[in-house]
Each structure stands twice: as C-alpha cells, then as structure tokens.
Image (cartoon, grey):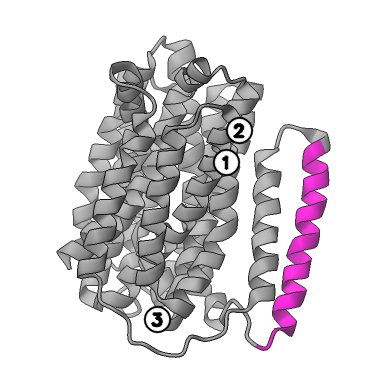
Amino acid sequence: MRRTLLVTCFAAFVTALDNSVLMVALPTIGRDLGLSTNDLQWAVVAYMLAFASLMVAAGAVGDRFGHRRVLLVGLLAFAAASLGCGTSESGWELALWRAAQGATAAAIVPTGLAVLRTDLDEARRRTGIAAWTGALAVALAVGPALGGLLSEAAHWRWIFLGNVPLCVAAAVLAHQVLPRPRITRPTPLPIRSTAVLTAAVFTVTATVLSIGDEGLVAALAALSGATCLLFVSVERSAARPLFPRALARPVFVGGTVAQALWGAGVSGVLFVLPLHLHRAEGFTPLATGLFFVPAALAVIAGAPLVPALVVRLGPWRTAAYGLGAVTAGLVATPFAHPPALLACLVVIGFGSALTTPLTTVALDATSPRSAGIASATVTASRELAGALGVAVVGLAFTAAGHSAALVLATGVVAVALGITIALHKAVGSRSHHVP
C-alpha cells in the first residue's frame, strides 16, 4: 500500500505543484525571454485549457485500457513536456510545451485517483484518498514559496527541468509496484461522446478564463452552451454512453459539487491574497510564498486524522466540520493583518484537509469499472471550479478590493457547507457512511 500511495500521491503533487510554482516565477520568465503580459498569460492558459478539456477523456481511456498503463504513459510524457518547457527560448514555444504538460497531466491525475479506488480495499481507501487530496493541497500551498526560491536562488528553468528525473523515477516505481490488470477485451470507447465532451469542456474553460472581456466572453458562452447541448444530445442517443447512470446518484453529484465549490473559494483566495500581500504589505515574492507554508503544514497535520474522524463521525460530518473551519477562517480574513491572517490560513488549511471524505464518498458511490470516468469527473469539476474561482474572485478583487473578494469566496465555501450538511441529513452519518 505504501508504495502505491507514494506513486499516486507523488504524481498528483508534481502536476499540481507545477502550476502553483510557475505563478511566482512569471515575472522572471518574462524578463528573461522578453515576453509581454499576454505571452505570459498564454503560458498559464494553455496548460489549463488542455488539462481541463482532456481529463474526462483520459479517465474514460483509463477505464477501457487500464489505469496503470495510462498513468505510466502520462508520467513519461509529462517528463518530456517538462524538458521542452525548461529548454524553451520563446513565448510560443513555452506555451506549446505548457499545453503538452496540461494534456499529459490530464492523463496522470484522474488515473492516479482511480488506482486508489480500484487497487486498495475499503479500509485503506480512506487513507489513500485523504493522502492524495492532501498532496494536491500541499502542492498548492508550497508552490509559491518554492517558485520564489528557485527564481531568486537558482533559475526559473529548474521549475520544469526538476520534473524530468522525478517523473521518470515515479514511472519506474509505478511499473514495479502497481498490479497489472487482467487482460480482457476492452469496452469500445464512445468516440463521439468523448470528442464532443472534450470540445464542450474546452469552450467552457475558455469562457471562464475570458471573464472580464465582455465581447469575447459572450461569444464563448454561446459556443460553450451549444457544445454542451450537443453533448447531451449525443450522449442520450449513444448505445454506450460515456457517463454511466451511477454518476447521477445524489451522493456522487452532491459530493462532487461540494468539493468543487470548496476548490473555487480556496483557489480564489490563494490567487488574491498574494497580490494583496505584495501590493498592500510590501512582501517580496519569496516572502509571499513562505507566508503560505504554515497553511501547507496544517494540511499535512490534518490529513492523518481524517480516517479516525470518519470512523468516529462519518464522512459527511467530518467534511462538514472541515468546511466549517474553512468558512470560519475565511470570515476573519478580510479584517486580519498579516500575523492574524497567518492564523486564518492555518485554520483554512487544517479544515481543507478534513474535506477529503467528499472525494471518498463520491467515488464509492460508483462501480470500480467506472472509476476512471468518475475520478476524472471529480477532478475536472474541481479544476473548472478553481479556474472560475480565480476569475470571479479576481474580478471582485480588481473592482472592489481584497475584502470584497474574500467575502465572495467565503460565501462560495458556505454554500458547499450547506450542501454537505443537507446530504448528511439525507443520507445519514454512521449507518450509511462508506469506510
């Protein structure tokens, strides 16, 4: 179990870290390569578009042809894309390699989570998914500090080049420790549904990322609406639909939505707070990054407690306590100066660790045969929600200041708390919880 956890958590950590590390290093990259702000935006947007739009398709491919195989290919391809990013000499070259990174990360993240769903027994799955989600949260929190350190003490290229030996080592370890699936005839992949869904997610993500540009967002919103309707039509008429009916269960939908809302709120906060600390408090990039390290340590401290709390309280109540802590921490942030703000971030980090049972109950509501598509749906929803949170909370920050932005983020997480409490009452706690 330990080596399986090491492989899957490391894969999730590297892919999540890559984006959060990059944010702090963007000014240095722009100065070194002579890039404009628009060029730098494409280095970020290209990754997000490829990652979000291909994730569900990658999960479906994993269900058909084996999660282990897709994970191995994804790790090696991510290493190659990272090498390309680290050796880029122009803005367009960096953007293309970043898109390749996003595409390969889309193969890594949902298949790694699906491996935990299918290869661990129920008693160990709680710990595995808690550790996996904790790895994502820690990467999000420590990324700015690591990015600032590499930019100031070494060179920004090591942000990407450092991934190469690590991903190759992870692929070798995964080849050795992950069990080989039984050789069976794969179920045909619904090509039409997969292709249309990829286009729909791409256009929805592009719409979210274009918020603030009124003309562009209107056109993209219309296009995304049309592609979403086309996907519904194709899926209804398909002999083998991409999404199994089990994904429509209230537990899966509710758990996925609650976690997505948490991701939207927290991602928005992690976007605007560094800007506030830099502009209003005079923090350097390295100091800003280090400011978030205690939040990462709080996630690390809270994650090991989750399995015991789930046994004692049930998954819904544990997640509700976690979301309650996140909401309480966010309520205080608009009024807090740096020392108190640091305490708020610790509370938010610890509470975030306790939300991991939402992933467990959502995935356990589905069958192992659809673990890949279910894992991809959960992860893609969180990714899209995170992008939406950055866009909307960022707009509030620009228009009305950091206090208004933080109040908005608080409201989003409070809605997630309300959904979790409602599901707890509807499903029950101890008698209905999934170990």
Q: Which residues are magenta?
A: 216-239
Residue 403 sits above or below residue 357 on the image: above
Asked whether the residues under the numbered discs 1 and 2 touch, taking CB atoms below 8 Å apart as contact, a structural biologist would say yes
Residue farthest to the left, as pictured: 2
Residue situated in front as seen by the camera: 327 or 304 = 304
The quarter of the picture where the N terminus appears is: bottom left
Q: How many angstroms separate mark 1 from mark 2 (CA)?
A: 6 Å
Closer to us: 396 or 340 = 396
| Magenta residue check for 20 | no
The correct choice, above or below, for 26 with respect to 112 in the image is above
Say which mark, if any, is on residue 368. Answer: 3
Q: Pinpoint residue 423: horizontal percent, then vertical percent.
A: 47, 68
What residue appears at the point 41 percent right and 90 percent down from the top-left corner?
A: 184
Q: Circle 1: is it few (<14), some (14-19), or many (20+) Cα within 10 Å? A: some
Q: Is residue 91 left or right of residue 283?
A: right
Residue indicated by mark 2: 92
Q: Is residue 399 visible from the viewing direction of this image?
A: yes
Left or right: residue 49 compared with residue 23: right
Q: CA distance from mark 2 to mark 3?
A: 41 Å
223 inside magenta stretch: yes
Q: Secondary structure at mark 2?
A: helix
Which residue is tagged 1? Answer: 96
